[in-house]
Amino acid sequence: MTEILAEPARPAGSQSTITIADALKQKRNVMHAVVLRDIRSRFFDHGLGFLIVPLMPLGHMIILLTVYSVVGKKTAFGDDLNLFFATGLMPAISFMYVSRFMSISLLANKSMMAFPVVRLLDIVIARAFLELIGIILAGTLMVIVLVSLGSDPTPRDPGEVLLAMVFVLIFALGMGIVASVITAIVPAFAMVYGLSMIIYYLSSGAPIYLHTWPEQIVYWCSWNPVFHAVEWMRTGYYLGYPDQSLDKGYLIACAFGSLAIGLIMERGLRKQMLAA
């Protein structure tokens, strides 16, 4: 990895400026090295440990669906309990796992800063890339599981389902950057942010159907952007799904707003992060 990150030697007297192509090549090498290091160091000091990344959210969903089936929980829409709850769990768990593991990216990989070419944002983006790949794999495996159980995971409106997933992942990316910056300065924040996932999860409506609860509770839950991702996802599957609480614009604004805030924080607090 040291060879990958090493800058090419330049002849004496040559100018220090590099071409755009050279800069892009250097950035590609840096990202490659950071990703490889993250894969190897995260689980069992072996690249195959990355296979656990998609298995964790998949296992989470399978356990919940099994519990719902055992206790005889009824589906609010359609006749397929597994499909109904899977449509809510997928966006909620995607947010939780991506943003949660991104929040400790700088803390876990601070030793990479010993290489001058590695920037803080490189580490965060590398972890985001790995988490997104993991969620895509988990989603693919979940579809396979649903089909094997006799469910039909084909959405009524694929475009709406795709948009819901895209914006909840952008929101996860933004919140992950914000949390990673704070955690790099105050490591204890990682635990606080991890515990906050419980609130995001329960108020998202993924594990429970909130529309049978009092309107005041639904209103307070609607302040959670993940709630709107779950609602948006389900409207793409079920015709007539109650969407009076769905605000797509709110989720989109939170997604791009958190991303902008995260990038501004990373830029403005670099000295504090490096000094911590």
Image (cartoon, rainbow, N blue to C red):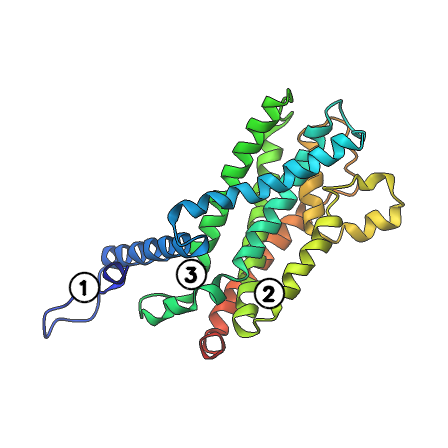
**Quarter-wise, where is residue 19 in the image?**
bottom left
Tell me which residue sits at (58%, 28%) in the image: 145
Q: Secondary structure at mark 1?
A: loop
Q: Which mark is residue 8?
A: 1
> If you read the primary sequence from the N terminus, does the residue marked by circle 1 or circle 3 appear first?
1
In the image, which is nearer the foreground, mark 2 or mark 1?
2
Q: Position of residue 40 (x, y in %)?
A: 39, 53
> If you read the primary sequence from the N terminus, does the residue marked by circle 3 or circle 2 appear first?
3
Q: Disc count in the image?
A: 3
Q: Position of residue 117 (x, y in %)?
A: 31, 66
The residue carrying pointer 2 sits among few (fewer than 14), some (14 to 19) or many (20 or more) residues within 10 Å by Cα, namely: many
Q: Nearer the viewer, residue 135 or 266?
A: 135
From this viewpoint, is residue 229 visible?
Answer: yes
Q: What's the CA distance linking mark 1 and mark 3? A: 21 Å
Question: On the picture, is 177 further left or further right than 49?
Answer: right
User: Which residue is denoted by mark 2 in the rendering?
Assistant: 190
Assess whether mark 3 and mark 1 are in contact (beta carbons under 8 angstroms). no
In the image, residue 181 above or below residue 223: below
Question: On the picture, is 268 further left or further right than 220?
Answer: left
User: Which residue is denoted by mark 3 in the rendering?
Assistant: 123
